[in-house]
Image: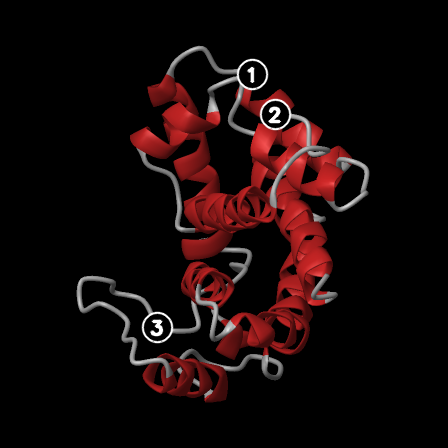
Amino acid sequence: MSSENLIPEEKNNIILESIQTMCRIFWGPDIESCTHLMEPTFFKQLETLFSMKGKAVPNALEKMQSITKKFKKEQSFFDHLNECYVRLFVNNKEGIIPLYQSCYEYENAPMMGKAAQNMTRRFESKGLCVENAIKEPPDHLAIELEFLFFLLSDTSSQGESALFVSETLLPWVGVINKRLESVSDECRFYSYAAKVLIHILELLSKDE
């Protein structure tokens, strides 16, 4: 997809779709998302995002694609990602990498800290709430990305998005990215995804 002739609405849609993609990835895998990830055109929107911002496509994005190409069936890809997701973020004897901002406030910080309270206030200020069906604290990475999606799609809130990215998301997602750099080769998909997310957030933090 060429970015040269895109109108502003199309460019904004590409940004929103890119955030939606990363949000879906960090919610954890399901068969439907794995099916989409395996489609040859799935990553084109991300490539277009970097192109329209005048940036080279991150090597990590290409590596994500190369991993998806190793699998012929959605079920086997799902099984792989699910095992990696659980090992990295849910249950690991060697220590998990939490997807909750509160856990990065200080060493050994617990869940539901100040960051979670701040996110609750942000939701309330916009007349939003975390659905009861979502059994996760409001500072889960995917929920924060959903809030960013809202800020970017709401014309009255767009000025807040760059600040939210630079002051809230980038610092702690950067720590996740660093921790994921040391994971074993068989679970590199989420390491590459974190790097791509950092690149996207850096673009959005400039409020271009």
The N terminus: image quadrant: top right
Helix, strand or loop status at disc 2:
helix
The answer to whether the residues at label 3 and label 2 have Cβ atoms under 8 Å apart is no
Query: Which residue corresponds to the image point at 49% horizontal and 15% vertical from the top-left?
Result: 71
The circle drawn on residue 137 is: 3
Residue 67 on image: x %, y %: 59, 24
Q: Is residue 193 above or below residue 155?
A: above
Which kind of residue does numbered mark 3 sit on? Pro
Query: Which residue corresponds to the image point at 65% horizontal and 78% vertical from the top-left?
Result: 167
Dot 3 or dot 2: first in sequence order is: 2
Which kind of residue does numbered mark 2 sit on? Gln
Residue under pointer 2: 65
Q: Is residue 172 above or below residue 26?
A: below
The answer to whether the residues at label 1 and label 2 have Cβ atoms under 8 Å apart is yes
Q: Looking at the rendering, which quadrant does residue 124 occupy?
A: bottom left
Helix, strand or loop status at disc 1:
loop
Give the Cα separation between the discs numbered 3 and 2: 30 Å
Helix, strand or loop status at disc 3:
loop
Give the Cα separation between the discs numbered 1 and 2: 6 Å
Residue 20 on image: x %, y %: 45, 48
Tell which residue pokes out farthest to the left in this image: 133
Q: Is residue 25 left or right of residue 63?
A: left
Dot 1 or dot 3: first in sequence order is: 1
**Total marks placed:** 3
Q: Is residue 131 left or right of residue 147?
A: left
Residue 138 on image: x %, y %: 37, 73
Q: Alpha-carbon neighbours of circle 3 within 10 Å: few (<14), some, or many (≥20)?
A: many
The foreground one among 199 and 14 is: 14
Residue 56 on image: x %, y %: 81, 37
The circle drawn on residue 69 is: 1
Residue 152 can be seen in this image = yes
